[in-house]
Image (tube, rainbow, N blue to C red):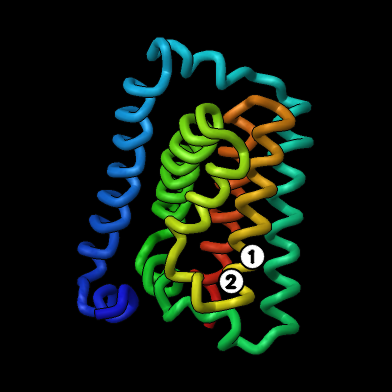
Amino acid sequence: MKQSELLKQLTDQEVKKSLLLSQTFILLIAFGLSFILFQYFSDWLTLFYWDVNEIFIYGVIPGFIIVLVDIFLMLFLPKKWLDDGGINERIFKVLSLGEIFLYTWFIAIAEELLFRGVLQTVFGFFSASVIFILVHFRYLNKPVLLISVIVTSFLLGFLYEATGNLYTVIVTHFIVDFLLGMIIHFKR
């Protein structure tokens, strides 16, 4: 059974719980792998530093650019090319605005700790980006969505490579998920 069909059978509460559990699982994988792959658990501290200008330039601006490109695609491409089987719509329609904010922060943190914090730090830019793409497997048979995920993945990898700062990619990821989630939530 397809993921979209399974999601249709879930209640709103089960959708929220499933999203929370999947992201918690990703976060646990990140921390578990860091115990194995990092020399010290405290190596996490070297992956974060607070630089407002850097976070704005390499986090906020790219996030808005990605969202603007996605809006452009929504306006000019056939809807079926951007349809993920209704999965994102099902998720973001059941979340309140506050929940969209909290869930997208959690998603951004969990996924970037794993993909950039652990995988890219240990295995490199290309490997982490490819794994990120594969985890978003539901887009593999949708060419436009796949290209979007590939570009976003490599952009996030590049931003982390350029800064060495997880705050930048977490902010970028959050802005993309939050704003696109809001667009989906309010779309009639």
Indicate the secondary structure of the residue bearing disc 2. helix
- Between 25 and 187, the one nearer to me in the picture: 25
- Between 25 and 75, the one nearer to me in the picture: 25
- Label 2 – label 1 distance at C-alpha: 5 Å
- Residue type, mark 1 in image: Ser
Indicate the secondary structure of the residue bearing disc 1. helix
Left or right: residue 63 compared with residue 142:
right
In the rendered image, the quadrant that contains the N terminus is bottom left
How many numbered tags mark residues here?
2
Residue 187: x %, y % from top left = 55, 77
Residue 108: x %, y % from top left = 49, 44
Which residue corresponds to the image point at 40% horizontal and 73% vertical from the top-left? Answer: 87
Q: Is residue 34 above or below residue 158?
A: above
Q: Is residue 7 above or below residue 106?
A: below
Q: Is residue 122 above or below residue 88?
A: above
Residue 69: x %, y % from top left = 74, 65
Local crowd size for mark 2, using a 10 Å CA cut-off: few (<14), some (14–19), many (≥20): some
Left or right: residue 76 compared with residue 47:
right
Q: Is residue 60 above or below residue 121?
A: below
Marks 2 & 1, CB-CB < 8 Å contact: yes
Residue at image mark 1: 148
Which residue corresponds to the image point at 27% horizontal and 64% vertical from the top-left? Answer: 15
Which residue corresponds to the image point at 54% horizontal and 43% vertical from the top-left? Answer: 127
- Residue type, mark 2 in image: Leu
Residue at image mark 2: 145
Local crowd size for mark 1, using a 10 Å CA cut-off: few (<14), some (14–19), many (≥20): some
